[in-house]
Image: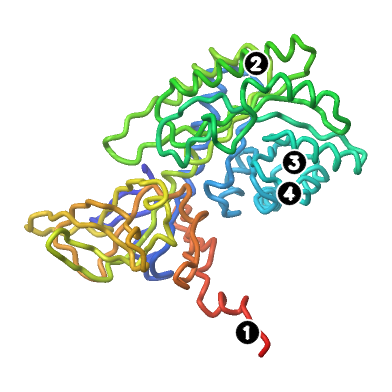
Amino acid sequence: MNNFNFKNNVLNVEDVSVIRIAEIIGTPAYIYSKKSFENNFNNFSNTLKKVLGPKSDILVAYSIKSNSNIAVIDILNSLHSGADVVSIGELQRALKVGIPPDKIVFSGVGKTQEEMAFGIDKNILQFNVESLEELKKLSEISISKGKECPVAIRINPDIEAGGHKNISTGVHGTKFGIDYNEAEKIYEYASNLKGIDIVGVDVHIGSQITNLAPFKLAYNKIADLVHVLREKGHKISNIDLGGGIGILYDNSDNIFSLTEYAEMVLQTVGNLGCKIIFEPGRFISGNAGLLLTKVVRLKSNSKHNFLIVDAAMNDFLRPVLYDASHNIIEVEKKNKKVNNLSYKVVGPICETGDIINENCYFNDPKEEDLLAILDVGAYGASMSSTYNSRPLVPEVLVSGKEINIIRKRITTDQMIAFESLAKK
């Protein structure tokens, strides 16, 4: 997190003190660095272009689900990013900030008729189709509109990607994609459907992948499939490789370099003459944000020391949903000669699972101390909720010395305003 540094013993985001942000917006709050989004995207895009060559046709389609704030999407649009969307809401967000429709891919297993029609009307680049039933429905809607719908079939290569089971999507038995062994049959079926234009193949095997081997296995299988499909007369011009590249969350992680990934892409699918689509989410947004929180209370029992903070599982779901571990640091370094103690950092939600970190070491923490939960730019605010009737957490974007509130804190009164009493 190069744009998150200590100055005079106080944590800064770019050129702004986190203490200053706390004074303006309170806690908890997500805080992002604009430079981090820009640097991550440019690193991803430039490395791929360098390795794959200047004549390669590459589309980096940011996975909006990782962080869907329109201010973030707008930053990436200014860098010529495309978008990977999984709902009509995400598609509307991409279009609102000006991402061209021909740089948008629509993924997801449960696209509704309304969503399909909307994407067809907007002339998006392609639909990543995940079932025979979806293919039939797309055909019906396209015919009714007198259009041809560009389609890539999502293939499930039955490859274990590692990591948590809830984010492994490329193994047999999950809800995602068409079984690899059924691919030839469904492409043949699709080729005879009116309103369907077969343009590509799609694969996505999971998220937070830190080993190149699963990617290589999947991409080799896709390359073999492309050769077979072309021999049977199918036009395959796009290969969507999905996302899934992991990031470093703590010092125990090991991960391949982006250059190594790009070289593997070149070796596996680089000679197919296709547009290659990438859908990075976490790699772009993960280390671009922190979650600012405040110590509410200290508590101890016979087993643990607890730091109870005002951020909770409704604000940040990853630890309870994925057993994710995030480093937590003090916003203000203190010169204290006290031995560090281990604390379990927990939130105030009325759930045993409301644990942000099982084991953190702090030096004599106090009530009202500010803490920063690191590397939460991906799947943080986008998965937040109002459980326990807690106000929806705000988001702040820092650009140099500028503080931009890009999502206001949703108050309890505002939440209740959407509800009404039943007639008696």
Q: Which mark is residue 13?
A: none
- Kindly identify which residue carries mark 2: 225
Q: Is residue 3 above or below residue 300?
A: above
Circle 4 crowding by C-alpha within 10 Å: few under 14, some 14–19, many from 20: some
Callout 4: helix, strand or loop?
loop
Nearest-to-viewer mark from 3 and 2: 2
Callout 3: helix, strand or loop?
helix
Q: Residue 112 carries which label?
A: 4
The residue that appears at 41% across and 44% down in the rendered structure is 287
| Amino acid type indicated by mark 3 | Pro
**Left or right: 116 as drawn, with respect to 217:** right
Asked if the residues shown at circle 2 and circle 4 are in contact, with their CB atoms under 8 angstroms apart, the answer is no
**Observer-nearest of 385 and 266:** 385
The residue that appears at 49% across and 56% down in the rendered structure is 381
Tell me how far mark 1 sits from mark 3, CA to CA: 42 Å
Callout 1: helix, strand or loop?
loop
The mark nearer the N terminus, 1 or 3, is 3
**Left or right: 257 as drawn, with respect to 253:** right
Nearest-to-viewer mark from 1 and 3: 1
The mark nearer the N terminus, 4 or 1, is 4
Circle 2 crowding by C-alpha within 10 Å: few under 14, some 14–19, many from 20: some
Circle 1 crowding by C-alpha within 10 Å: few under 14, some 14–19, many from 20: few
Tell me how far mark 2 sits from mark 4, CA to CA: 28 Å
Q: Which mark is residue 101?
A: 3
Circle 3 crowding by C-alpha within 10 Å: few under 14, some 14–19, many from 20: some
Residue 124 place in picture, x, y as percent: 76, 39
